[in-house]
Each structure stands twice: as C-alpha cells, then as structure tokens.
C-alpha cells in the first residue's frame, strides 16, 4: 500500500493550477510586512494595564471570599504533602496536627 502522504503529494503535483504562482512569495511577504491591523488603535498598553488590574482584583476578591469561614489555618507543609500530611511525623512534631 502506498503512503498516503506520497499519494497526496503526487496528486497535488498532477493537478493543474488555474493561475500562475509566479510572484506569490513576494505578495505574501508584502502582506506580512504591512502588518496586522491594530485592534486597540495605539492603546495596547492601557488595555494590558486594565486587564492586569482586573485580574488582580478578581484574584483578591476570590481570596477574600475563600478566606472567610476558615477556622483552622492551613500550614504550607500541609498543603504540599496533601491529605495524608497530618500523619507525617514532621508535621506532628512541629505542632501542625
């Protein structure tokens, strides 16, 4: 059985083009060098700053919402060691359990 990639390339080679490809590469590079349209009309820095501040505010709001109602303070070692961490001797010795 013939390789599908080779079969597809051979079929593409046999196909007739309705127009010449001369100058296609130059046309592509001209369009690339023209650049993409500026969606923010020169205000990209302000948009980046607004998005960053918004993300920070959302993060702070979620942290505040998750922080209320917690009676027991979780130590960082406990979080790293997962649910079975309270059984670890090092946590028990430090008084984390």
Image: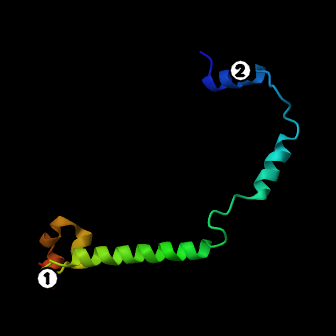
Numbered disc total: 2
Residue drawn at x 24%, y 72% as measured from the top left: 79
Q: Which residue is mark 2?
A: 11
**Circle 2 Cα neighbour tier, 10 Å, few/some/many (<14 / 14–19 / ≥20):** few
Q: Does dot 2 land on a helix, a strand or a loop? A: helix
**Circle 1 Cα neighbour tier, 10 Å, few/some/many (<14 / 14–19 / ≥20):** few
Using the rendered image of the protein, determine whether residue 49 is visible from the camera's viewpoint: yes
Q: Which comes sooner in the sequence, label 1 or label 2?
A: 2
Along the line of sight, the residue nearer the viewer: 65 or 76? 65
User: What percent of the width, then of the height, locates residue 73?
Assistant: 17, 81
Residue drawn at x 87%, y 41% as measured from the top left: 23
Q: Quadrant of residue 33?
A: bottom right
Looking at the rendered structure, which numbered label has been put on residue 93?
1
User: What percent of the width, then of the height, locates residue 54?
Assistant: 43, 74
Q: Does dot 1 land on a helix, a strand or a loop? A: helix
Looking at the rendered structure, which numbered label has been put on residue 27?
none
- Closer to the observer: label 1 or label 2? 2
Residue 23 falls left or right of residue 8: right
């Amino acid at each position: 059985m013939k390789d599908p990639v080779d079969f597809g390339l051979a079929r593409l080679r046999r196909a007739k083009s309705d127009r010449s490809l001369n100058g296609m590469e130059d046309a592509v590079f001209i369009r690339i060098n023209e650049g993409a349209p500026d969606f923010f009309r020169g205000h990209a820095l302000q948009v980046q700053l607004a998005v960053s501040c918004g993300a920070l505010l959302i993060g702070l709001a979620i942290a505040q919402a998750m922080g209320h109602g917690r009676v027991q303070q979780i130590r960082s070692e406990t979080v790293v060691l997962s649910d079975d961490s309270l059984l670890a001797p090092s946590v028990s010795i430090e008084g984390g359990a």
